[in-house]
Every structure is written in C-alpha cells, then in structure tokens.
Image: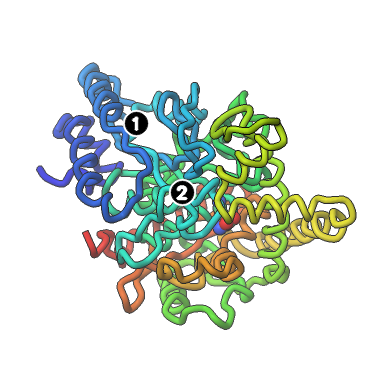
Amino acid sequence: MTELNRLTIAEARDLLRRREISASELTRECLEQIKLVDPKLNAFITVCAREAHEQAAAADLRIAAGDAPALCGIPLAIKDIYATRGVRTTCASKMLENFVPPYDATVIARLRAAGAVFVGKANLDEFAMGSSTENSAFGPTRNPHNLERVAGGSSGGSAAAVAADQCLGALGTDTGGSIREPASFCGVVGLKPTYSRVSRYGVIAYASSLDQVGPFAKTVRDAAILMNELAGVDPRDSTCAARPVPDYEAALTGDVTGMRVGVPKEYFVDGMNPEVEGAVRGALNAYESLGARIVEISLPHTRYAIAAYYIVATAEASANLARYDGIRYGLRAAADNNIELYNRTRARGFGAEVKRRIMLGTFVLSAGYYDAYYLKGQKVRTLIRGDFERAFGECDVIATPVAPTTAFRLGEKMADPLQMYLSDIFTISVNLAGLPGMSVPCGFDREGLPIGLQLIGPAFGEEAMLRAADAFERRGAAPRRAAIL
Ligand code: GLN
C-alpha cells in the first residue's frame, strides 16, 4: 500500500489494529511528505523526525502486545504554542526561538498516553495573533490549494499540514477563529470546543478568557476521535470544567431529522463573497433535504463583536505578555541595567503585530480609559452572550459562513491591520460567548479555493454540532485532496 499519509485517523486506526500497516511505515510516509512539500508550504517550524520514529516504534510494540489505545501510532502536528517536553516551543516568536520547555502541556501528555506520534511543531502567527500566519518570525505558511494564498491563521501551519497530508490530524488553538478560519481556507475540519471543555495547562496564553484548544482533521469523525482524548477535567487548570466527557464519536449517527438549524440574518451581509454565500446556502439546502428545519434567528449585537474582541483580547494579551521581560525565559538582550534590558529584549523579541496589541491593550486598561473601553467591551460581550442564549431557545445548532472570503493573497492585508481583523467577523462572537464552533468544508470557489461552513452549538453542545457536521459531510460533496499536491 502507498500513500499511507493520506489515510484518515479512523482508517489508520483500523489498519493498525489489524496490523495491516505499522506505525513506523505510516510515520515514515508522513515525514517523507513533509520533506517533499514543506519547502513550499512552510507549515512546520520544527520537524521532529527522530522523536517521531521512536514514538512510532514504541507504538508498534504496544500494538504487538495487544495494547492499542485510540491514537496509537497516529502521526499528528502540534501548533508551536503547546509546551512539549524537550522540543523547542517558539510561538513563532524571536522571543522564544530557543525555549525548550521542561514539561508537557496536559493535552500533549494525554495524546502521548494515547499513543500518538508527534511529527513536528506547526507554524502560526506570533503568539497566535493574526488571521493569516504571516505574522510568524519563521516566515508565512502557504496554502496547499494555491501557494500564492495564505493558509489562514493563526493556526495556519496545523491546517496546511493536515490539508497537505503531512500528518493525519493536528492541534490548534482558537481565541477568535484561529482554528476555524485556517480550516476553512485549507479545506479541512477544525473544531473549537466550549470554553473550559479542554485543559489549557501548558498552552502559551494569548487572551485567557477566550483561548481554547482544539483539533484539525480530515473528517468530522477524526475530529470526534481527537476530542475524545482531549476533553476532560485537569487538576492543573482551574478553568477546566469537571463535566463528564461524552463519547463524541458515538454522537455521529448521521441522523439530523427534526434538528433546527438556525441561520442568523446578521451574518449574510453586503461585502460577502457571493461564492461563499452560495456554498453556505447550498449547505442549508442540504440540511433541509436531510430532514432538518432551517429557522431564521437574530444575533443583533454581531456588529459590535470585532470592536469588543479587539479590546478584550489585547487587554489580556498585554498582561499575559508582560512575562517576556528577558529575566524569566527566552531572549535576553545585553544591557547595563534592568530597564534597558527589558526595553531592548522586548523591542528585539516581539514582532510588529504583537507590539501593536501590547500597546493597544495597555491603553484600554489604563486609568481614565478603562471605563470607556475595557468595561464597555466587557458589557458588549455580555450582550453578545445573551444573543446566543436567546437564539438557542429557537434552534439546536447555528449555521453560518466561517469567513466572508476564501483564502486571500499573501501580503494582501498586511499593510492594513483593520482589514485583517475583519476576516474574523463570523468567528469572534463564538469565543466572546464561550461556545463550541467548527468549520466543515462545503465547497470551492471558481479558483478552486475551499469554502467552510461554520456550525455553532450551545455550551457543551459539541455532540449535536458534530452530528450535524458529520451528516453534512456524509453527502460527500467536496473532494478532500489539495489540488497543488
Ligand atoms: N485573528 C484573531 C486575532 O488575531 C484570532 C486569533 C486567534 O484565534 N488566536 O486575534
């Protein structure tokens, strides 16, 4: 058999358990694909070939001994924002270029225990700030469907790696859309769980009241398989919910009869690419033919979401990034005194977007402006949350586009941060409200670029959301393979 790297996790899991393939050959083919296509894509900051081969060999031994946990021998890519013991964790920043954590993030430890193989650390926007992966100190990631286009961001490396069959699944983080938007741009599945569903211990913080961990995968089933391992309480993360974890894979019954799919009228606005709108409307028709009911809903505070997010997120970022002072970890610039050391280290270590956000965040928290901006932003957040609570009285899941456009050109939005921020218009409210959301491929535009359908569930409503996504995916409308490869 060839091209094992193209398998889904579910397919590979079965073949491995039946011992028709080995974890070692599966891992080898992923690493070969990385060697072949990553010079073009730049999806990885660090490739972990030696470690991956060792983990695969250990997985093969476990399988031979009849002990094959869910992800035994499955090659995954990890966004380079997760602490990985012994492997550098850069956050795509010069600040952490040589930082090697002495411990694993909780989810990394869980995946290790489940037998996963880590092929490498994936590229991202510096400290997860961005929508295109162009804000990386290690160069941008390119879209596997068209190398002149961005992969989306901030988890662009993870999305591209899955789309390019460099791994079978990946981890990202989503603070305002960083899993869903790159998943949409690269034509893969991306899931942001409910806030608190998954531990964030060992995940480098951007905006702590919004950040959430989640999977990328080639299929909805694979995303469910990964969620089964990721979700659950963690004594090391006090923000992590102590709720029982359902079997997400078992939720994929294919049956959406009678399900009420809410469509917010505020999400179909002027300026949206008509091909994106067409593909999403096509998906809504598909739901009707599957026996679901489409209901119009209203999320009236949507138009304040971007402003509220960029106040709350930058405020939290300015506090979280204060720790990079040249004393504790990472880069340290030479200086004669401490003040100079802080100044030089932070001037040299952070890129332009990170500096912009630290300044904006410091401003909105400062005396005199706190009430006018930060507090106002938090009040808007409460209103947005209320919009969703009301809407979920009328529907079971919400369906929207993921982004107003398909993948844009490299460089197209770099000169104008506000244009870049507008890419997040449909994803950001979900983080402000703490809800689960996901991106499922629903078609292609004229140029062959993927389009994503966003499904949003009520808090801890991942099962219905996954069921809806899977039922749509089973219709088999969209080809998975990235055209360029
Ligand atoms: N694009 C948004 C931002 O730049 C979201 C990023 C994210 O989800 N990490 O903040």
Residue at 61%, 46% (x, y): give it: 347
Say which residue label 1 marks.
116
Residue at 34%, 69% (x, y): give it: 449
Say which residue label 2 marks.
137
Q: Residue furthest front?
A: 336
State the quadrant of the C terminus: bottom left
Marks 2/1: CA distance? Answer: 28 Å
Q: In this orientation, does residue 465 appear?
A: no
Quarter of the rendering containing residue 446? bottom left
Q: Nearer the viewer, residue 155 or 301?
A: 155
Question: In the image, what residue type sits under mark 2?
Answer: Ala
Element at label 1? loop
Question: In the image, what residue type sits under mark 1?
Answer: Ala
Residue at 70%, 64% (x, y): give it: 307
Name above or below for residue 201 compared with residue 145: above
Picture quarter with ligand 1: bottom right
Front tag of 2 and 1: 2
